[in-house]
Amino acid sequence: MLNLFTAKTTRFDAPVLQLFNTESRTLETFTTLYGHKVLMYSCGPTVYDYAHIGNLRAYVFVDILKRTLEYNHYQVKNTINLTDFGHLTDDGDAGEDKMMKGLKREGKPATLAAMRELSDFFIDAFYEDLGSLRILPPTTFSRASDYIVEQIALIKTLDEKGYTYETSDGVYFDIAKFPKYGRLGNINLEELKSGARVEENTEKKNPADFAVWKKGELGWDSRWGKGFPGWHVECSAMAIATLGKQIDIHTGGIDHIHTHHNAEIAQSECATGKTFAKYWMHSEFITIDSTKISKSLGNGINLRHLIEAGYSGDDYRYWLLTAHYRSPANFSFDALKAAKQALYRLKRHIYEEYKNISGKPSADYIKRFHAAINNDLDTPKAIALMWELIKDDTVDNSAKCATIKHFDKVLAIGLSDELDDALFKLGVVSVDDIPDEIKQLINDREAARIARNWDESDRLRTLINLKGYTIEDSASGPKISKS
């Protein structure tokens, strides 16, 4: 199988790939369990609603990670799960099932069939988001309700090995039986008090014990009665089923560290007797006005909102990549507008100034780019390197074009599109397609510029912008784009 990044380039000694491991809390040199194959599992969305822009950051991070691994000539087999039942609003096994919450919102009955129908819609919406963000599809999308047999089998194994106990509302994992519980994030269990992070359940032996089966009127039949597997069990069972008992990398958001991923480690390692994941990697939160994004707070902006406001998936992806995946980022439309303008200028360089003619890439810039992304996916540095290249008079335009397109194999922000498609996305408008009203405003502005009436020229530019067009002055005359 041909690797995506085996195109011939100038040879040099590749820098060592280093990734930050949440478990060790250090930057580690990446090595695999299985030669040149990488097995990677990523926690996916709960498909009861559209993914908000904060959720989507986690999948852009996974995509950059996958592309970087492939850039380093690894073959990546990866799974992203789709949770379509059983995820309660509180990680401590309390609150309402999010899928049930979605059914109530949509006025649908509380049945498994209705739950499947609801999740079908939002799974399709999630796929659409991934496409808009140029995210490579995983090897497997694992839908939780398609892996019930595997989840029940995992719970049965834990039960038979003595790691669980039954209560009136479910079956719980006894963390006292796994002394290493909480090693991810260095959780201090002595400080975990009942009611602090989890709702009190007097039948639990320890407040941090987590459900592997929740009893209820809705769900599937099992030896413990009707109900559904716990949310944490879903991921362990699907990771093992699709990738095996030991994987190289497990990813998620930082909100997964405390409970979800520690639970995954405990139940997986107790069931198999093997170390579950070699590397744990987590992306940081995005805030809006320094407030965590949350549907309950009503600030859950999704990608459709951005597109309706005139932005593209490329614009949002570019904005995300200007911050390191482990750094918090504060979203604003002003910041997104600046990202859109920056990306627009990059594309103009490729398709107009450089004429989309690729020569031989710059070995020096490729080496520096490789060093940046191999340093724990340093995309801000990689983007800064592109702008440095554009300003570098010692590199000719054909080499600049080829080098930037080489960068785009990992960054994936639309700098390698075919010419016709790229110009369409730029929104460049031919003279014949400009309405007469806009043509007149452009002519009036040109007259004002010739007369050096800069105030009138600025006024007319603003008026043109308000009517949905962008005007950019160049040596060959004004260029008009649809905003």
Image (cartoon, helix red, strand yellow):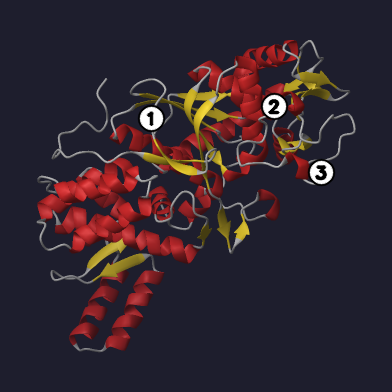
Location of the N terminus by quadrant is: top left
- Residue 193 bears which disc, if any? 3
Q: Secondary structure at mark 3?
A: loop
Q: Earlier in the sequence, mark 3 or mark 1?
A: 1
| 295 or 382, nearer to the observer | 382
Task: Name which residue type carries label 1.
Answer: Thr
Can I make out residue 251 in this image?
Answer: yes
Task: Name which residue type carries label 2.
Answer: Ala
The residue where tag 2 is placed is 114
The residue where tag 1 is placed is 31
CA gap between label 1 and label 2 equals 44 Å
Total numbered labels: 3
Q: Earlier in the sequence, mark 1 or mark 2?
A: 1
| Among the 4 quarters of the image, the one containing residue 44 | top right
CA gap between label 3 and label 1 equals 38 Å
Label 1 packing within 10 angstroms: few (<14), some (14-19), many (20+) = some
Compared across the picture, whether 472 is left or right of 274 comes to left
